[in-house]
Amino acid sequence: MGEFLEMGGYAAFVWPAYGLSFGLLALLAWLSLKGLKDTQKMFDRLSADAEIDERKSDK
Amino acid sequence: MADLHRFANPTRFLKLAGLIQPWALAVFLISATVGLYMAFFTAPADYQQGESARIMYVHVPASWMSMFCYTVMAVASAVSLIWKHPLADVSARATAPIGAAFTFLALATGSLWGKPMWGTWWVWDARLTSVLVLLFLHIGYMALQGAFDDRVRAAKASAILALVGFVNVPIIKFSVDWWNTLHQPASVVKMSGSSIHPSMLWPLLIMAIAFKAYYVWVLLVRMRQELVANKVRILRLKQVHGG
């Protein structure tokens, strides 16, 4: 196991390369999902407000 | 409500996206697992570069994706300019940050590979510099998209930037043949056939599939977000103008 982690002396280059790659991809995926959720929430709120306004103006 | 549908409710697209998304995510998870396993356990160390060559299995697919994403952006921009298809601009917008991420990874992992092999993190040679320009093009595209309040003008200006910048893609591809460079020339995609051993080629291709599936999945998430954001904009406009 130790030998595997050492990567033939290149551990300081191999592991950061993989960590950075999958870390950044995970971050981008999370931000994209969060963006979708937040925007959807805002839309739901705005359309609920719009309905209330419409009802008010109907009265 | 009529304008809302006309602008931003491509129901068919959303239905299709809902069908594709879980499959894209599954393909990504499976191929990334298999690809990583092969990259570390079945692929041999390089006879010259030793274990450092394993960086290749993220560096090369990320680099392919950086050019692929930019090409998608350029084609979508052309479609957006010529046919004014609303989804074309949305897909180009959604692609830009993914392309920027892959371009950054191509540069960063290349740098991490270059230090032990070339003895330097960075050289201003044609391949590295043209990929850095690609990163700036992605970022410039995103900045331009965000610089206009008017979405139509933003789409037009950034589409023109994407098309003009496309000249950089063949420059990147052929930079290793046209100029002297530390970077090695192509070994997977070339006229005389691939010169890389199958034990290294397979993990490379499987990681490339993983990154492509990741792109599809995140692209669809971001496109859905853009479409909801369009609806939010229209609702806000209606409220401002008194419904």
Image: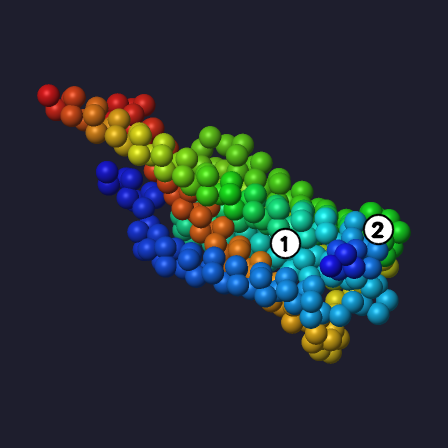
Q: Amino acid at mark 1?
A: Ser
Q: Does residue B210 appear to the left or right of A46 in the view shown?
A: right
Mark 1 highlights which residue? B66
> How busy is the neighbourhood of tag 1: few (under 14 within 10 Å), some, or many (20 plus)?
many
Please, what secondary structure does the residue beneath circle 2 have? helix
Estimate the x, y position of residue B172 in percent, counting from the top left. 72, 57
Q: Residue at x 63, y 68 (%)?
A: B205
Q: What subunit carries mark 1?
A: B
Q: Does residue B168 appear to the left or right of B81 in the view shown?
A: right
Residue B167 shows up from this direction: no
Q: What subunit carries mark 2?
A: B
Estimate the x, y position of residue B86 in percent, counting from the top left. 40, 48
Q: Residue at x 39, y 55 (%)?
A: B17
Which residue appears farthest toward the front when viewing the image? A1
Which quarter of the rendered picture does the C terminus of chain B lie within?
A: top left
Q: Nearer the viewer, residue B48 or B176?
A: B48
Mark 2 highlights which residue? B115
